[in-house]
Image (cartoon, rainbow, N blue to C red):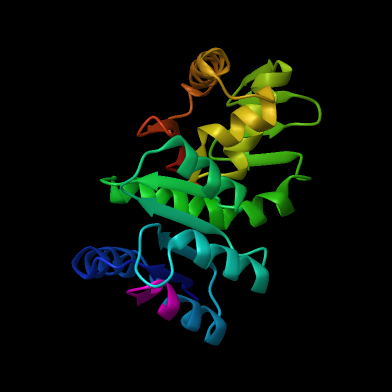
């Protein structure tokens, strides 16, 4: 069953193009052209995620998000806006936004972000998983042991946590900020560079398995591509 998206965008041309792109990528999209129509759609149907433009007539995206959260506080929301003001971004997150994207943006990146947000619940369910058999590797996160073919490695705590996140997200987008918050407990220039070092270490450990590749996704995160499931 396709995931259902409520897209509220007052630019009808842009909204139609974005709706078509998401539909092609197997989402069921309802497009509303202002906040009042968007709220009516939300109250009458069920959606897995909402994408709201911020600057709209009748009811802006922030007001719409407040109304939506009163109805269902667990509904994920992504804000789209041409404004890159710090105050707006902070307000969006204070309202419970899962992401805030400034226009113009890469639609493929938006797609990855949508998938990552939708996958979070699945990730929470899989966090207790300790062993992974993927391609030609066997990974035991409890023991911090990685076997690649005939070679065995003892991972450091951060290598272990990072590889576990990649395995849980395998073949999907793992946001950089998610890993930084979960493993490094803070997000800044130094922790980001530290994470890059650990990604390089994991790539080196996995290089003998041609069925696996850690891909950098637009500088926003990573994807553990499994060529041989």
User: 188 or 205, which is in the foreground?
Assistant: 188
Q: Is residue 145 left or right of residue 179?
A: right
Residue 55's image quarter? bottom left
Percent x, y of residue 168: 62, 44
Looking at the image, which residue is at 46% across and 73% down?
Answer: 2
The answer to whether 70 is drawn above or below residue 213 in the figure is below
The answer to whether 202 is drawn above or below residue 3 in the figure is above
Q: How many marks?
A: 0
Q: Is residue 11 left or right of residue 189?
A: left
Looking at the image, which residue is at 54% across and 15% down?
Answer: 201
Q: Is residue 97 left or right of residue 155?
A: left
User: 199 or 31, which is in the foreground?
Assistant: 31
| 19 part of magenta stretch | no
Percent x, y of residue 182: 68, 32
The answer to whether 201 is drawn above or below residue 148 in the figure is above
**Magenta highlight range:** 28-37
Looking at the image, which residue is at 73% across and 24% down?
Answer: 145
Percent x, y of residue 102: 35, 44
Residue furthest to the left in view is 13
User: 195 or 168, which is in the foreground?
Assistant: 195
Residue furthest to the bottom in view is 44
Looking at the image, which residue is at 53% across and 84% down?
Answer: 45
Residue furthest to the front in view is 58
The answer to whether 58 is drawn above or below residue 216 in the figure is below
Q: Is residue 10 left or right of residue 42?
A: left
Percent x, y of residue 162: 62, 28
């Amino acid at each position: 069953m396709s995931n259902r998206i409520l897209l509220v965008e007052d630019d009808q041309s842009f909204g139609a193009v974005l709706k078509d792109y998401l539909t092609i990528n197997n989402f069921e999209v309802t497009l509303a052209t202002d906040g009042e129509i968007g709220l009516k759609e939300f109250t009458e149907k069920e959606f897995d995620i909402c994408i709201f433009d911020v600057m709209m007539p009748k009811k802006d995206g922030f007001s719409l998000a407040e109304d939506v959260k009163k109805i269902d506080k667990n509904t994920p929301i992504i804000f789209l806006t041409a404004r890159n003001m710090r105050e707006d971004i902070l307000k969006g997150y204070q309202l419970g936004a899962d992401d805030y994207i400034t226009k113009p943006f890469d639609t493929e990146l938006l797609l990855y972000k949508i998938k990552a947000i939708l996958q979070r619940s699945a990730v929470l369910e899989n966090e207790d998983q300790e062993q992974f058999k993927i391609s030609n590797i066997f990974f035991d996160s409890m023991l911090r042991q990685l076997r690649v073919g005939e070679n065995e490695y003892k991972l450091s705590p951060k290598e272990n946590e990072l590889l576990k996140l990649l395995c849980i997200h395998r073949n999907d987008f793992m946001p950089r900020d998610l890993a930084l918050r979960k493993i490094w407990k803070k997000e800044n220039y130094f922790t980001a560079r530290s994470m890059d070092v650990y990604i390089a270490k994991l790539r080196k450990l996995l290089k003998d398995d041609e069925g696996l590749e850690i891909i950098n996704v637009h500088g926003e995160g990573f994807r553990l591509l499994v060529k041989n499931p």
